[in-house]
Image (cartoon, rainbow, N blue to C red):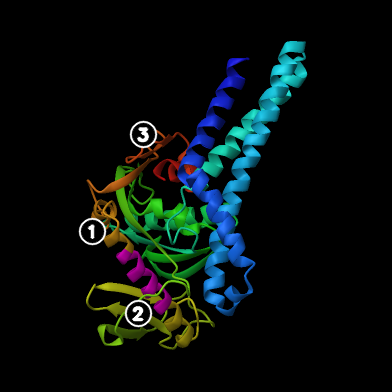
């Protein structure tokens, strides 16, 4: 068999082996049978919350098992087709078979990455918070570029993107922004983006056209749904209202509708100003607070997150997870995984899949 076809087959087999190992294949099959029996038991539906949890687990297992079996079946059929075409000297059919193997290899890789999203909140919607580092206009412009990058990434993946809160820079860009991305596995993929991001470029705001280095931090945390309980005391909260910022004109907000909530024991601050109603802004701020407290608990429980949290304390040298170099050469490099791209424009337009996959 030609080396190209064999390389695709080996890649698919590796992905299948990882999928089966990750699922604990025999246990997963038994568990799916157990969950199916529970779904068919009418007594389960007397407790809607429990039924929802069972259905969610069953759906995830069933999708993973079905996808794995489908890939294995297609691999067997296509490999046999390629061998037959090669034996008969049918180069056209052989080329079609190799192309099919390449497509199947890409699908297997995608399913492998999806299988890694097994954390209890990975399937949830997510908040992405971007904050400019020190450096004034340069860093604020960079933070604005990052906010756009994550919006474009979300749109590319069919996620609904909402701007929850934004504080504009004095001349350009933003001081901070909070995005809400809604869709399947939004948090699972985006969580790998938490950390400090570094930009190197010739500044458009420097009349001497000097090269500048700018920093901005990204913090990703999951939306907490009704199946996750987060406890806090109302007495530990300080709630402030202020006038929402806007572009001005006849529709300028003249009421103190924006809401900021501070959780005093942890120092966590959340805010929302995208709604004209103070009541709606307050409700959204409470949702963010629950999400931040939940993410904090996840970080405490996961020892690996301790190092990650350190990147959130200082937006500057020595803490960045990724560098984006626009001048004197073009390259984006993830400092955790070594993954690089020679097309920063594509990355800044939301092409982040390779970086997320490697980090997962």
Screen quadrant of the C terminus: top left
Decide: few, some or many residues near mark 2? Use Cα within 10 Å; few <14, some 14-19, many ≥20: some
Dot 1 falls on a residue whose secondary structure is: loop
Earlier in the chain: of badge 2 and badge 1, it is 2
Disc sitting over residue 313 in the figure: 1
Mark closest to the chain's N terminus, 3 or 1: 1
**Residue at which label 3 appears:** 328
Q: Secondary structure at mark 3?
A: loop
Tell me the CA gap for discs 3 and 2: 42 Å
> Which of the two residues, 108 or 280, is positioned nearer the viewer here?
108
Residue 152 is left or right of residue 127, and the answer is right
Q: Is residue 103 left or right of residue 91?
A: left
Tell me the residue that label 2 is attached to: 260
SS assignment at label 2: strand
Q: x and y percent of residue 306 in the render?
A: 24, 55
Range covered by the magenta-colored residues: 285-297
- The residue shown at (53%, 75%) is 49
Labels in figure, total: 3
Q: Position of residue 72 (x, y in %)?
A: 62, 35
CA separation in Å, label 2 and label 1:
21 Å
Q: Is residue 149 visible?
A: yes
């Amino acid at each position: 068999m030609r080396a190209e076809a064999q390389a695709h087959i080996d890649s698919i087999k590796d992905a299948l082996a990882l999928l089966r190992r990750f699922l604990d294949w025999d246990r997963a099959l038994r568990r799916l049978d157990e969950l199916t029996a529970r779904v068919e038991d009418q007594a389960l539906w007397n407790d809607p919350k429990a039924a929802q949890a069972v259905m969610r687990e069953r759906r995830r297992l069933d999708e993973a098992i079905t996808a794995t079996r489908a890939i294995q079946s297609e691999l067997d059929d296509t490999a046999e087709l390629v061998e037959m075409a090669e034996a008969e000297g049918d180069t056209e059919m052989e080329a079609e078979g190799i192309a099919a193997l390449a497509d199947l290899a890409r699908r297997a890789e995608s399913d492998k990455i999806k299988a890694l999203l097994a954390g209890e909140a990975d399937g949830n919607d997510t908040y992405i918070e971007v904050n400019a580092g020190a450096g004034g206009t340069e860093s604020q412009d960079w933070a604005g570029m990052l906010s756009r990058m994550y919006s474009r990434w979300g749109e590319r993946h069919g996620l609904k993107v909402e701007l929850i809160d934004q504080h504009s820079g004095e001349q350009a860009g933003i001081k901070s922004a909070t995005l809400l991305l809604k869709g399947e596995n939004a948090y699972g993929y985006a969580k790998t983006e938490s950390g400090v991001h570094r930009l190197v470029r010739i500044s458009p705001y420097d009349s001497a056209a000097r090269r500048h280095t700018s920093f901005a931090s990204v913090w990703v945390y999951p939306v907490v749904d009704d199946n996750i309980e987060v406890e806090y005391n109302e007495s530990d909260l300080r709630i402030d209202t202020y006038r929402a910022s806007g572009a001005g004109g006849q529709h300028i907000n003249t009421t103190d509708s924006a809401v900021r909530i501070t959780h005093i024991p942890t120092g966590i601050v959340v805010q929302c100003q995208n709604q004209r109603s103070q009541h709606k802004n307050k409700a959204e701020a409470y949702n963010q607070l629950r999400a931040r407290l939940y993410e904090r608990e996840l970080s405490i429980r996961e020892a690996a997150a301790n190092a990650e949290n350190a990147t959130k304390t200082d937006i500057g040298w020595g803490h960045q997870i990724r560098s984006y170099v626009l001048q004197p050469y073009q390259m984006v490099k993830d400092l955790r995984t070594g993954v690089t791209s020679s097309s920063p424009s594509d990355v800044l337009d939301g092409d982040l899949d390779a970086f997320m996959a490697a980090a997962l």
